[in-house]
């Protein structure tokens, strides 16, 4: 299972979380990555943790003020990028162009989607993975794997119908090892989570609890 911790714009210490995530990944052998704010990618990748961008813009080098250039996040140490997060939705054409940008910069890609129909459309664009995250469960602490298991299995089916090589993650409300096991049992190959770690009093303990069943 792949555990990707999205720090969003939460007021946590990204280096503290990243250091804990790097240690937990080393100790457990579980693939754990952290997606900080773009401005923190350099510092986070310095900890040795697998580092992801939260977004890259669809544009190339050029006159694009305010963009998040794929090449720049890769230079800063990112190995992959989320696209089309529910909190940063893109037009279909922009997802496609951002995937091209990520490919140019050699970044791995996960396209987020709200439901299985969108998962099918996202998978058709050829990312490495897709992630289903029902927006109404994001940040609630109620795990998608128990609150809406059918959406996960339907997302896995939808992606498989389009492209069997596209991995499917799930996210929203995931915070414990039990949630991770439930997500795996539903056919997902990873989880995308945020508040369970970024807002935890002890992010290291939260990460250790998450990977415990996989040790
Ligand atoms: O949006 C999410 C991860 O990208 C999920 O957020 P929570 O883990 O806070 O529900």
Image (cartoon, rainbow, N blue to C red):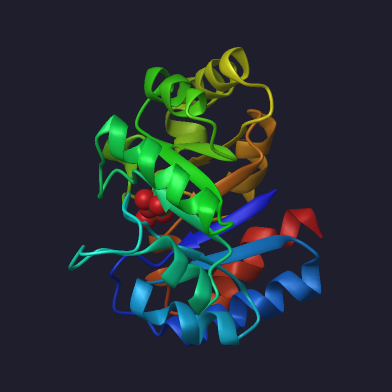
Residue furthest left in the image:
65
Taking the spot 51% from the left edge, 17% from the top edge, the residue there is: 154
Give the residue displayed 45% in from the left and 77% down from the top.
Answer: 41
Q: Position of residue 56 (x, y in %)?
A: 37, 57
Q: Is residue 71 visible?
A: yes
**On screen, 24 above or below 64?**
below
Q: Where is residue 87 in the image (x, y as percent from the top left)?
A: 25, 49
Q: In which quarter of the image is residue 40?
A: bottom left
Q: Is any atom of residue 171 visible in this view?
A: no
| Frontmost residue, 177 versus 101 | 101
The foreground one among 171 and 212 is 171
State the residue in front, 111 or 181: 111
Residue at 57% from the left image edge and 39% from the top image edge: 129
How many circles with numbers are drawn on the protein?
Answer: 0
Residue at screen point 17% across, 68% down? 65
Side of 215 relative to 156 (left or right): right
Q: Is residue 208 above or below residue 107?
A: below
Seen as rendered, the residue at the extreme top is 161
**Whole-percent x and y of residue 93?**
30, 33
Say whether residue 207 is left or right of residue 84: right
Q: In which quarter of the image is the C terminus?
A: bottom right
Where 45 sits versus 180, above or below?
Answer: below
Q: In which quarter of the image is residue 50?
A: bottom right
Q: Residue furthest front?
A: 62
Q: Position of residue 197 (x, y in %)?
A: 47, 67
């Amino acid at each position: 299972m792949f555990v990707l911790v999205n720090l969003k714009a939460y007021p946590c210490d990204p280096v503290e979380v990243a250091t804990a995530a790097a240690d937990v990944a080393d100790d457990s052998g579980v693939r754990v990555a952290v997606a900080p704010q773009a401005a923190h990618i350099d510092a986070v990748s310095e900890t040795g943790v697998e580092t992801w961008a939260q977004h890259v813009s669809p544009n190339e080098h050029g006159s694009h003020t305010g963009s998040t250039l794929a090449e720049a996040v890769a230079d800063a140490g990112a190995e992959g990028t989320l696209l089309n997060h529910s909190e940063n939705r893109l037009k279909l054409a922009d997802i496609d162009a951002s995937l091209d940008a990520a490919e140019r910069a050699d970044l791995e890609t996960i396209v987020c989607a709200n439901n299985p129909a969108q998962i099918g459309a996202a998978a058709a664009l050829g990312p490495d993975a897709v992630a289903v995250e029902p927006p109404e469960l994001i940040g609630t602490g109620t795990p998608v794997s128990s609150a809406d298991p059918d959406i996960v299995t339907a997302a896995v089916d939808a992606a498989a119908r389009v492209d069997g090589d596209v991995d499917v993650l799930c996210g929203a409300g995931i915070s414990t090892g039990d949630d991770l096991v439930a997500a795996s049992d539903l056919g997902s190959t990873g989880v995308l989570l945020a508040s369970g770690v970024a807002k935890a009093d002890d992010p290291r303990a939260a990460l250790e609890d998450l990977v415990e069943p996989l040790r």
